[in-house]
Amino acid sequence: NAGVTQTPKFRILKIGQSMTLQCTQDMNHNYMYWYRQDPGMGLKLIYYSVGAGITDKGEVPNGYNVSRSTTEDFPLRLELAAPSQTSVYFCASTFIDTSNQPQHFGDGTRLSIL
Amino acid sequence: AQSVTQLGSHVSVSEGALVLLRCNYSSSVPPYLFWYVQYPNQGLQLLLKYTSAATLVKGINDFEAEFKKSETSFHLTKPSAHMSDAAEYFCAVSDSGAGSYQLTFGKGTKLSVIP
């Protein structure tokens, strides 16, 4: 019963490096989301996807890219890491048909940019 | 645009006391509302959700919330706090416009339970 799985759990990057945060779900959910969480600020939406091949920007997309080639996977890419991207990143998914349903969250990736 | 305000970034209660965490929202359409809990170093877990079926919503671990349209509030309560309730709690409102189904989160309230 895996749910939403995020890897890695922790990572330290140097300024200017790139990396991909992985997210996969096994619940056949159509909607997937990436958030960042900063202390005292709640969660901010970075990107979301309504299905394979369809992605769109959220509130804070600058410095990030996503792709959704399969229903299960929704990776988040940082191309040129900056200190401002130090944060905890959460992936979430849900199934939307005609009504709203709760989102299921992964355990997060804690990323430090030094 | 929708927004959520959680009053009090930190709330402390004694074990066995009433828990009250406040959430006010703004929305131009009837909202979907959620409360999530986050334990240290974990993701968010759903406590309860409001989807217009009933104004008093019961969730897990004896938590409940009441939707009050006139006050645009969705406060979370629990009659008797346990040590295991110490965590951060987030209120969220759903924006279902244009099929995006995005959640807007409050900034969170950290609950401490004093033995």
Image (spheres, coloured by chain):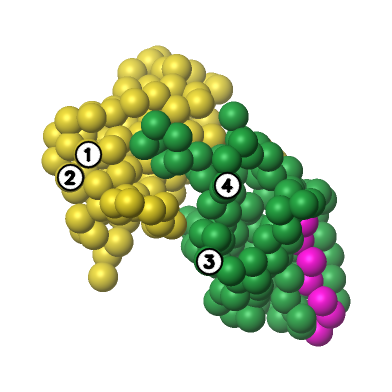
Q: Residue at x 21, y 43 (%)?
A: A73
Q: Which mark is residue A51?
A: 1
Q: Residue B34: percent from the left, percent from the top?
A: 56, 56
Foreground label between 3 and 2: 3
Q: Residue at x 38, y 48 (%)?
A: A92
Judging by the rendered image, the residue that carries numbered circle 4 is B30
- Dots 2, 1 in contact, CB < 8 A: yes
Please report, as a chain letter, where disc 1 is located: A
Q: Residue A113: percent from the left, percent from the top?
A: 49, 27
Foreground label between 2 and 1: 1
C-alpha distance separating marks 3 and 2: 31 Å
What kind of residue is marked 2?
Thr
Q: Secondary structure at mark 2?
A: loop
Please report, as a chain letter, where disc 4 is located: B
Do badges 3 and 4 share one subunit? yes
For the residue carrying disc 2, how many other residues have a C-alpha within 10 Å: few (<14), some (14-19), or many (20+)?
A: many
Q: Residue B70: percent from the left, percent from the top?
A: 77, 52
Q: Which chain is green?
A: B
Q: Residue at x 17, y 45 (%)?
A: A71
Please report, as a chain letter, where disc 2 is located: A
Q: Residue furthest left?
A: A70
Do badges 2 and 4 share one subunit? no
Q: Which chain is yellow?
A: A
Judging by the rendered image, the residue that carries numbered circle 3 is B53
Judging by the rendered image, the residue that carries numbered circle 2 is A71
